[in-house]
Image: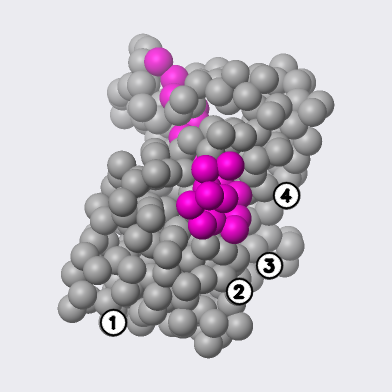
Amino acid sequence: ATIQWRGRPTEYIHLQTEEALDTCVHSRINFIDLRDSNIPGGWAFCGIPAGINIDTVKFKTVIDNAHARGIAVFGTVACSVPPERFADVIRTFRDLIALKVDGLWISFDDFGPGKNAPELVASILKLATENNIPNDTVAITPPSGSYQEIDTAWNKQIVSVAGAENMKWFFTRIPNKFDNDMMKKMGWKTQLCWWHNWPRPKGGLLNDFAGGRPLYDSKWAYYELLPLAAGWNNPTYSELLAAKDYTNTVMLWQTRPADYDCHILGLWAWNPEVHDFNATSQAAYTYV
């Protein structure tokens, strides 16, 4: 699983690195990704903007601290760009490789499908191979419309690129047998990777509904820890138990501090068959 700080500047990751990574270890999360940047405002939730100058000191600090704890690190670049900016994408991935990231993350996400995406993906896979990064250590987030659904024209185009069938493909769909079988028929050689937008609390006196963002002047809004059902597609316990047979990679995406949220997804993913939400919540509260 990975924890991502959506929309938070690199400085936040840098200052919180050791504490957050200790939480990852405690909650069994074993990979993270870097996608924030030193651009004004730090808004890089769809990946590091292609071609910017990465703050190598801060990124290297995160990577070194992660590796010291046995946590793998992906470098994520925003790839929804026109062909004239493909070189910028490659340059940014090269910078991340030089910093010793373990994997590359091709992010289209909410920025859209880009143009000539198969050509760009092929170039990134070629770069990975040249740097001894296996195809199954390259991740991809399809654009909106194709990360919610598998059988789309965009996904079919990209999975037909040589090597793309072995990448880690992140979808927001709950892992299930139907999708697993469909992916095999369509050419995938890997299982669906589950991106779970969790939690999605209802709005209250302190927070809005989407990510528990504060309505008042405070860093974080408070709400009780919520089960995984309080996220996209509202997975039931039976669906969560069955999901273990159809995925081996799960990702938490949320704006909350790591030490508050990581345990619920991380400890479930580590051993779904014995998951107990109340006991896991108590472990998280005790840890905090």
Question: What segment carries the magenta color?
Answer: 180-202
Q: At numbered mark 4, what does the secondary structure look like: helix, strand or loop? A: helix
Q: CA distance from mark 1 to mark 3?
A: 29 Å
Q: Which residue is mark 4?
A: 25
Q: In the rendered structure, find residue 67 and report the number of the disc placed on it.
A: 3
Q: Residues within 10 Å of mark 2 (few under 14, many from 20)?
A: some
Contact? badges 3 and 4 (CB < 8 Å): no
The picture quadrant where one finds residue 250 is top right
Contact? badges 1 and 2 (CB < 8 Å): no
Q: Which residue is mark 2?
A: 134
Q: CA distance from mark 3 to mark 4?
A: 11 Å
Q: Is residue 205 left or right of residue 270?
A: left
Residue 220: image location, x then y, percent: 43, 31
| Residue at (74, 31) in percent of width and height | 272
| Residue at (40, 15) in percent of width and height | 202
Q: CA distance from mark 2 to mark 4?
A: 25 Å
Contact? badges 1 and 3 (CB < 8 Å): no
Contact? badges 1 and 4 (CB < 8 Å): no
Q: Point out the frontmost of discs 1 and 2.
A: 2
Question: Which callout, 2 or 3, points at the residue further toward the start of the chain?
Answer: 3
Q: Residues within 10 Å of mark 1 (few under 14, many from 20)?
A: some
Q: In the rendered structure, find residue 87 and report the number of the disc placed on it.
A: 1
Q: How many marks?
A: 4
